[in-house]
Image (tube, rainbow, N blue to C red):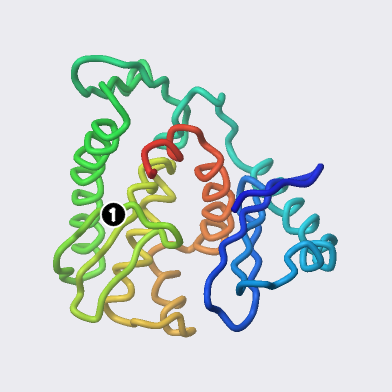
Amino acid sequence: MNDATDEYRVIITRKPVRNARMRVMPDGTVRITAPKGFNTARFIEEKRDWIRARQAEMDQLAAGCITVASDRMLLLGTGYSVREGSHCETDHCDTVITAPNPPALRQHLTNDFRSLITETVAIRADEMGVSPGRCAIRMQKTRWGSCSSAGNLNFNLKLYALPAHLMDYVVVHELAHLNVLNHSPAFWSLVATQYPEYKNAETDLRRYWVAIERNHWWNTIQK
């Protein structure tokens, strides 16, 4: 169910859960998961200050990131025009992407990104002395990437929106998990040997996540 206030949009999902949960999305939308009969109006009123604080945090993150026009797609850290055409093509010189429809655009970007990320993984894996397994590309909702206990890597297609140095950091991060599966001090020490500015990268990734979630074209192809 969709609802709205003067300040923000609210999406309410009724499920057989014990406690109500609330999240503020990057675009400011408030998502509530609540049991049947739960008073969501009162819940919203009680959390109004928290909601405003979270929305302000999202706005601040977005303000610290690149801003592209609403009709342009964030790709490789810059804005690309998207044009309708009979075939798919990316012109990196003129920053133009051509595709007949959103599903074709998503597949085209997946194919392009697979080649790019595979090359980056190969270079970094050689430098780090590790041997990853399969490398899959998915449109993930909460993670930039993941590494399984079997050594297989998953990368979010949204990484294609990032500038090259942040994409490189995510690769280093996931490859480091081949040696240390958790996020212990030993893991971060290993990451630091390959990417000393990892703390800055983590901050920038949060900013870009908000920017990507607010981008029209990324929202269009993930539906």
- In the rendered picture of this protein, how many numbered marks are placed on residues? 1
Q: Where is residue 216? Give x, y as percent.
A: 50, 33
Look at the image and tell me in which quarter the C terminus lies: top left
Quadrant of residue 43 within the rendered picture: bottom right
- 84 vs 159: above or below: above
| Residue at point 75%, 69% (across, down) | 39
- 54 vs 60: above or below: below
Q: Amino acid at mark 1?
A: Arg
Q: Residue furthest front?
A: 37
Q: Where is residue 117? Give x, y as percent.
A: 25, 49
The crowd level at tag 1 (other Cα within 10 Å; few <14, some 14-19, many 20+) is: few
Q: Secondary structure at mark 1?
A: strand
Q: Where is residue 181? Give x, y as percent.
A: 34, 82
Closer-to-camera residue (142/188): 142
| Residue at point 41%, 40% (across, down) | 161
Q: Is residue 63 left or right of residue 198?
A: right
| Residue at point 39%, 75% (across, down) | 190
- 190 vs 125: above or below: below
Judging by the rendered image, the residue that carries numbered circle 1 is 138
Quadrant of residue 25 within the rendered picture: bottom right
